[in-house]
Each structure stands twice: as C-alpha cells, then as structure tokens.
Image: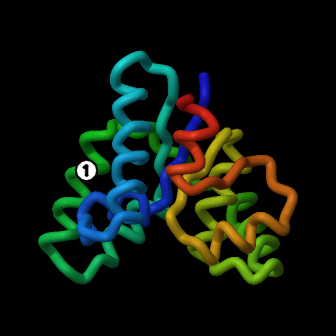
C-alpha cells in the first residue's frame, strides 16, 4: 500500500484564494488524492507532530479551525517522534532546507513514507538536489505520475 504524507501547505491549500489557477489546480489534486484514499484504500495518509505544531501556529483562528477540521476528516495515521528524526532533520538543514520542512521529510524517511506532497516551490527545488528515500512532489505532479 502506498504511503502519502501531506505537509501543512497542502492542508491549507483548499482555504487559499481559489481564484488563482495554480491554487485551484493544486487544491483539486490534493482533494483527488484524499478521495482516492477514501474510495478504494489505495493509499494510506500519514501525519505527524510537526503537522500538528505548524497548524497550531496559524494566526487566523478561522483558517486554523478549517485546517484542523480538514486534517481530522482525512483520518491520517499519526507518526511517532524519535530522536533519529531530529538528527535527520538537522542533517537536511545542511542542504538549506528550513527546519520544519526538514522535520517533515525526516518523519517520512524514518517511517518509510513513499510520497511527501508539498506546494512549497522552494522546498521542491531544494530536495531535487538531494538523494532522499521519499519522493517529494507537488500535488499536481503526484496526480499526473501516480493517479493516472
């Protein structure tokens, strides 16, 4: 079974300005992946304490509530934290990856996640230069590559 991890920007995306074509397409891709999981259990979705922490930091309380409700509706399997995850995140920071992004990737690597999805263009560019045990993709790329 394919394991997928969505970073927080993916949980936020449906609540961003959908008038922008890129945002709307990414939202549709994210929802397609979630629906595919619900429809036929083709994927398992995972989350982590890093996701919970980042969502707790959303300043707009209305958006925070919407994002938390969205995450709850997904019924993601929650990953456990381990000191090795922190060490891997610090290693990834050496590639100019911000700590929270590195932490998401470290959770994925440590727990054998197949795909991490993000809409963060800077992160996608940085990870393209690294050799990771998890494939990091934009949700649109994921739909084109995996759901087709």
Q: Residues within 10 Å of mark 1 (few under 14, many from 20)?
A: some
Residue situated in front as seen by the camera: 147 or 13: 147
Position of residue 120 relative to residue 78, above or below, is: below
Q: What secondary structure is marked by label 1?
A: helix
Q: Tell me the quarter of the image containing the N terminus.
A: top right
Colouring style: rainbow
Rendering quarter of residue 107 = bottom right
Residue 101 placement (x, y as % from top left): 60, 70
Identify the residue at the far front of this view.
Answer: 21
Residue under label 1, please give it: 70
Residue in the image at 77% along x and 67% along y: 87
Residue at image coords 75%, 66%: 127
Q: In the image, residue 16 lies at what x, y percent?
A: 27, 69
Horizontal placement of 92 versus 2: left or right? right
Rendered view: 125 above or below 51: below
Q: Residue at x 41, y 64 (%)?
A: 22
| Quadrant the C terminus occupies | top right
Residue 98 location in percent, x, y?
Answer: 64, 80
| Quarter holding residue 21 | bottom left
Residue 106: give x, y in percent of width and height.
69, 59
Please indicate whether residue 4 sits to the left or right of residue 16 in the image: right
Q: Nearer the viewer, residue 69 or 116?
A: 116
Q: Residue at x 49, y 52 (%)?
A: 6
Q: Quadrant of residue 142?
A: top right
Compared to 89, does 97 lie above or below?
below
Residue sticking out furthest to the top: 40
Which of these two is toward me, 33 or 46? 33
């Amino acid at each position: 079974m394919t394991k997928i991890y969505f970073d927080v920007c993916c949980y936020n995306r449906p609540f961003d300005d959908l008038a922008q074509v890129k945002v709307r397409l990414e939202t549709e891709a994210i929802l397609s992946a979630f629906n595919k999981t619900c429809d036929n259990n083709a994927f398992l979705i995972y989350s982590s304490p890093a996701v919970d922490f980042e969502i707790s930091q959303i300043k707009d309380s209305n958006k925070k509530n919407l994002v938390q409700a969205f995450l709850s509706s997904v019924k993601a399997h929650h990953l456990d934290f381990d000191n090795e995850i922190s060490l891997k995140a610090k290693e990834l920071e050496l590639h100019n990856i911000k700590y929270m992004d590195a932490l998401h990737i470290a959770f994925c690597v440590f727990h054998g996640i197949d795909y991490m999805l993000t809409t963060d263009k800077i992160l996608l560019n940085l990870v393209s230069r690294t050799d990771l045990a998890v494939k990091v993709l934009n949700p649109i790329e994921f739909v084109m590559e995996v759901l087709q």
